[in-house]
Image (spheres, rainbow, N blue to C red):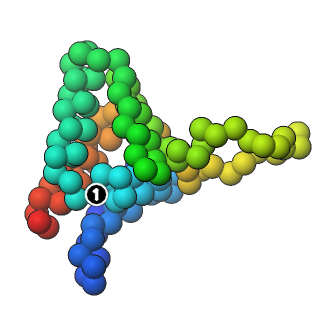
């Protein structure tokens, strides 16, 4: 999983760009986590609790995206994925959701989060 952090020169907003198959992680960092040092610290604390075996899982439901953590991985997905379909798809067809859901290892997620925290703190 590769990523790059940028700052919009016009608006001053922070932007996280993640590699293909992990784009939604970048969207979560940019939109749900944003430049909020307290929220970043909260998520890092939950990662530490998971790694120490103090909890089995944790979830943070955002406006558009949800973060789920367990002892081994992180999952970010669009909240609309949880809704039931109103119609059935033909056999051998499925909805494209690769840009709406992504998984990575907990340690990789922690490293990305620490990098984001350093980037944000440097820019504030």
Residue furthest to the bottom in view is: 10
Q: Residue at x 29, y 17 (%)?
A: 55
Residue 117 lies, in percent from the top left, at: 18, 52
**Image coordinates for residue 116, horizontal then vertical, percent:** 23, 54
Q: Nearer the viewer, residue 104 or 47?
A: 47
Q: Position of residue 80 (x, y in %)?
A: 58, 46
- Give the mark count: 1
Residue 22 appears in the rendering:
no
The structure residue drawn at horizontal position 30% and vertical position 52%, both measured from the top left corner, is: 33
Q: Is residue 61 left or right of residue 55?
A: right
Q: Nearer the viewer, residue 4 or 124?
A: 124
Q: Pick the quarter of the image with the C terminus.
A: bottom left
Please, is residue 43 above or below residue 15 in the view? above
Front-lying residue, 18 or 80? 80
Residue in view at x 68 percent, y 51 percent: 96
Query: Which quarter of the picture shows residue 89?
Result: top right
Give neighbour class at mark 1: few <14, some 14-19, many 20+ (Cα, 10 Å): some
Do we see residue 20 in this rendering? yes
Q: Mark 1 highlights which residue?
A: 34
SS for dot 1: loop
Q: Is residue 25 left or right of residue 113?
A: right
* Residue at position x 19%, y 32% in the image: 45
Farthest residue, direction right: 90
Q: Nearer the viewer, residue 105 or 9?
A: 9
């Amino acid at each position: 999983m590769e990523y790059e952090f940028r700052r919009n020169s016009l608006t001053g907003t922070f932007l996280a760009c993640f590699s293909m198959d992990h784009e939604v992680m970048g969207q979560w960092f940019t939109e749900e986590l944003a430049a909020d040092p307290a929220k970043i610290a909260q998520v890092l604390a939950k990662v530490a609790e998971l790694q120490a075996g103090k909890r089995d899982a944790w979830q943070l439901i955002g406006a558009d995206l949800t973060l789920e953590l367990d002892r081994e991985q992180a999952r970010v997905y669009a909240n609309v994925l949880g809704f039931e379909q109103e119609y059935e798809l033909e056999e051998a067809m499925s909805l494209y959701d690769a840009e709406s859901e992504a998984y990575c290892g907990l340690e990789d997620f922690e490293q990305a989060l620490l990098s984001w925290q350093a980037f944000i703190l440097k820019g504030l």
